[in-house]
Amino acid sequence: MIYLITLAMLACAAAVWVMGSLLIAVTPKEVALPALDAEAIMLHAGPGQAVAASYLAGEGRGAILLLHGIRADRRQMVQRARFLHQQGYSILLIDLPGQGASTADAVTFGLTEAEGVRAALAELRRRNQGQRIGVIGVSLGAASLVLCRDCGPLDAVVLESMYPTIEEAVVDRLKLRFGAAGGPLSELLLMQLPLRLGISREQLRPIDHIGSLKAPLLIAAGSEDQLTTLPETQRLFQTAAEPKELWLVPGAGHVDLHAFSPEDYERRIGVFMARNLRADPAAKLRKAKASP
């Protein structure tokens, strides 16, 4: 009996190890955006990290960086890019390191992906000097922004479906798939972080850094999301600094919120970006009158 139990435990551990291999695996692929007449860019984000990007020049009304979710690429953000570009914003879409056509050694759930965000923001600022900068991040993209150190000030941030801690992200997903067994299995996965990636779970806690954004913030999530649950989203919102607002999309799970409710999304996000990115015409007039 003990022999059979030992074999079962070894088989379970092996399965979880394979699962961990799949979660951090990098599989580069070509990414084309035929729907957008965008300039192709390749950015350097550190050793072994080349970031593939697409850029749309705007009309001087501000600039927005778009960051997709895990196991996705720039194509996930095309519809957002289209409606925001129509409103006059410059748009930069990137494949996060280790996703799409961007290179990396492994997926790190936002930690080293943040280096790609840093490089993208530097490029966006260089191309749009003097303009206000906004970011929309989805899931992994949101975590990558919040975990980004020395990324500079921002003027508007939208975080969609972002996990608060890596522990909760893993437990939520495994419990959804394996039920009560998901808890113990999650610990076996989390133990692999330092072994495989040389990082700790303490480094993957966006909730510890969200209060440092110091930018107008909109947190969006599906009301029925089981991968980032409602209590988790509410904790993120409570921890964030003002000014902030929360949008719970009725009936949505852990899905593309723009695709789920495009009209509401474009209205809410459009108003939020316009309020925070577009220069105040009255302020411009006052500045012009004050000039000698």
Image (tube, rainbow, N blue to C red):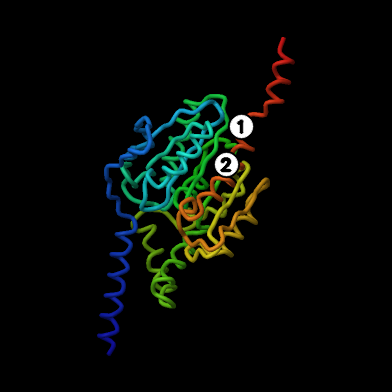
Task: Mark 2 or mark 1: name the one nearer the start of the chain.
Answer: 2
99 relative to 258 in the view: left or right: left
Q: Label 1 near label 2: C-beta < 8 Å?
A: no
The residue sitting at 57% across, 41% down in the picture is 270
Count the marks. 2
The residue sitting at 32% across, 68% down in the picture is 16
Residue 196 image position (x, y, % from top left) = 33, 56
Q: Residue furthest top?
A: 292
The quarter of the picture where residue 97 lies is: top left
The quarter of the picture where residue 52 lies is: top left
The quarter in which the N terminus is drawn is: bottom left
Q: Residue furthest front?
A: 263
**Amino acid on which the number 1 mark rests in the picture:** Arg
Q: Residues within 10 Å of mark 1 (few under 14, many from 20)?
A: some
247 relative to 190 in the view: left or right: right
Residue 184 image position (x, y, % from top left) = 42, 74
Q: Give above or below for 190 relative to 267.
A: below
The quarter in which the C terminus is drawn is: top right
Q: Nearer the viewer, mark 2 or mark 1?
A: 2
Q: Which mark is residue 278?
A: 1
Residue at the disc numbered 2: 270
